[in-house]
Each structure stands twice: as C-alpha cells, then as structure tokens.
Image (spheres, grey):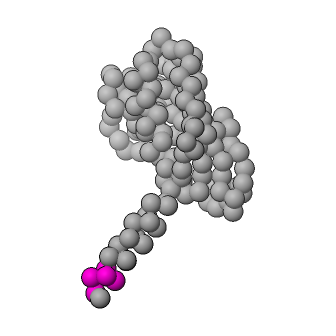
Amino acid sequence: MKKKFMLILMVVSICLLGGCGGKQSADVSIDYGNSSLYSKEDMDEAVKVIEGEFNTWEGCELHSIAYSSDDQCTPDNVAWMNELEEANDAKEVFTECIMFTSSFHSPKEGGGAWEPDKEYTDYEWWLARSDGGSWKLMTWGY
C-alpha cells in the first residue's frame, strides 16, 4: 500500500512539474534574416538561450523569434553590453552582441509584468559574448 501511494505521488509530481514555465507552440517561427556577422549555428545558440529564459515564464506562449539585423551589432551596443556586465559585478569583456525580437502571448489571467491575454510583439532580446564564446542573455523587454 505504501509503495502504491509513493508511486502515485511521484506520477502526480512529475505531471505538475511538467506544466511549469512558458511554452512554445509547435510552430515557433525562427527568422534568421541575412547576416554577414553570424552563422545559423551562432544564431541557434543564441535562440536556445532565449528559449531557456522564456520557458521560465509561466503561462506565456512563444510564437516567433527573429534576428534584428547586423546594424544592431555596433561598437556602441557592444559597449552597452559591457556596461551591463560591469553593473552586475561580472568580469567578462564582450566583443560581440546580437539582438532578436520575439512575439508571444501572455497568460489569460495575466500575472507578473504581463497584461492578461495579450499578444506581445517586437519584444527585444540582447545577448553578448566574447570572441565566439557562449552567448549570455544581458537584457530583454521593450
């Protein structure tokens, strides 16, 4: 009896934990645009970082992610990423940055910073890295 109860408790726990976080619709659109700076693999690595953060947003549904353009990858924006890094008492010095936009739908009941049942578009995601290293998500929002 005790084993059966523990098994049921474990199954219920797994089901509950599986429902946490944001979700991606089966048809999330990824627009890589045209870049002379970054390969599709570079962008895929950045998109994974974005999706990792997004998946913590309970009740939100991701629809699309799009590369902004090489025009956003300026020395001024790299300097901004380094300022953000320094403000967080981190020591990495970035040499590259990348920006994506996304669209997603907020939870029907809202919650946190989200207005209820709203489609968010052109939501920005800024990432930085050092000489081809791993992307680090620096800031996001409007």
Query: Which residue is depicted at the point 48% across and 19% down?
Result: 75
The quadrant of the picture occupied by the C terminus is top right
Asked whether residue 125 appears in the rendered view, the answer is: yes
Residue 54 belongs to the span the image colors magenta: no
How many callouts does the rendering have? 0
Q: Main secondary structure of the magenta part?
A: helix
- Residue 9 % position (x, y): 37, 77
Expressed as whole percent of the image width and height from the top left, the position of residue 117 reads: 72, 54
Residue at x-position 51% and y-position 33%:
126
Residue reaching furthest top? 36
What residue range appears in magenta?
A: 2-6
Of residues 30 and 42, the one drawn nearer to the viewer in this rendering: 30
Given residues 20 and 124, the one toward you in this image is 20
Residue at the extreme left: 3
95 in relation to 53, above or below: above
> What residue do we see at 29% from left, 88% from top?
1
Task: Residue 4 in the image: state x and y as whole percent.
Answer: 31, 82
Q: Quick check: can you spot residue 79?
A: no
Q: Tell me which corner region of the image, top left, top right, bottom left or bottom right, holds residue 121.
A: top right
Dividing the picture into quadrants, the one containing residue 135 is: top left
Q: On the image, which quarter does residue 24 sit in?
A: top right
Image height of 10 relative to 136, above or below: below
Question: Residue at horizontal 44%, vertical 21%?
Answer: 40
